[in-house]
Image: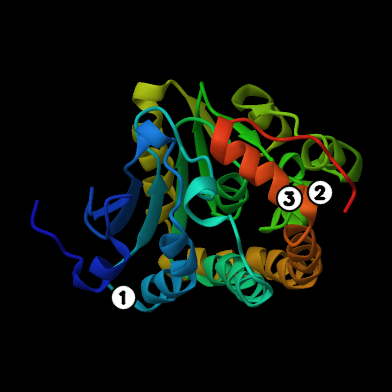
Amino acid sequence: MESSIDLTPYRPYQHDAALFDEPREGILRLTLTRPEKWNPLPQEMHDTLPELFSTIAADRTIDAFVLRGSGGVFSSGGDVKGGMQNRHAGEVVEMHRIAVRIMTRLLEIPQLTLCIVNGPAIGFSANLALHFDFLVASENAYFQETHAAFGTVPGDGSMSIWPLLLGPARAREYLLGGARLDAAEALRLGFVNRVAPLDEVDAVGMELLEGVMAMAPLAVRLGKMVINTPLRAAAEQSLNLSMAAEMATMLSEDFKNSVDTFAKTGRWGQDWKGR
């Protein structure tokens, strides 16, 4: 298929962890490509997401944006071994700024957005997925918020979107207790639009997306803007507070010890000191 999207502006965002293509005319797709490591988002990829989303928003050749994992895994979130250790206060403050912009810029994309969660979605990646317009999950998928297991307050948009979808009581169970939300329960609770077998999840997602794209484009685009207005307001309000709390806990001894333990053993350290 001859590409209708100029992929040149997206080359700076493409590396061994991510690949852009155009599966169907007018649809830009980003695939996470390190399933053997559970598709973590390298720090450089995480930090450029606001600019990527702004580039997509300004690209009039794009009708929709799709994010997907590969190899039966969506993403384990941030790369713990590759970017979460030994951060000084200035880096933590910059992370706060970037994290707020990631979610607000994603919600500001005027084109339709679809996230195909083709396996476990953990930590930051789960929260990112929940801010897309549509979310289709494979039967083997689950969502898990793991910040508290590492000794930090859940941030990355979780404190606004999970309570909105679940209510405060259920949200506390997942956000603070680290419980897994499997695909079937996520569908029942309205977390996702569709659940499909792994080998069908991409087709089901594209069918959903193209069904909406067939509607009147001005109505869809303006309708999306109206629906996203309270989501953006909630993100602005709670994201700044939750990210400030997360950044404070990232400077704690508990966080450092937990991350160091994970880097050495692959398991979370839970020798909590409360400092």
State whether residue 151 appears in this view.
yes
In terms of image quadrants, where is residue 60? Answer: bottom left
Q: Position of residue 239 (x, y in %)?
A: 74, 66
Residue at the spot 67% in from the left edge and 34% down from the top edge: 268
Residue at the spot 64% in from the left edge and 38% down from the top edge: 261
Res 240 label: none
Circle nearer the viewer, 2 or 3: 3
- Secondary structure under the numbered disc 1 in the rendered image: loop
Could you give the CA–CA distance between mark 1 and mark 3, rounded to whole angstroms? 43 Å
Circle nearer the viewer, 1 or 2: 2
Res 163 label: 2
Could you give the CA–CA distance between mark 2 and mark 3, rounded to whole angstroms? 24 Å
Q: Position of residue 105 (x, y in %)?
A: 54, 72
Residue at the spot 73% in from the left edge and 33% down from the top edge: 189
The amino acid at mark 1 is: Arg
Pointer 1 residue:
60
First in sequence: mark 1 or mark 2?
A: 1
> Along the horizontal axis of the image, is 3 left or right of 20?
left
- Secondary structure under the numbered disc 2 in the rendered image: helix
Could you give the CA–CA distance between mark 1 and mark 2, rounded to whole angstroms? 34 Å
The amino acid at mark 2 is: Pro
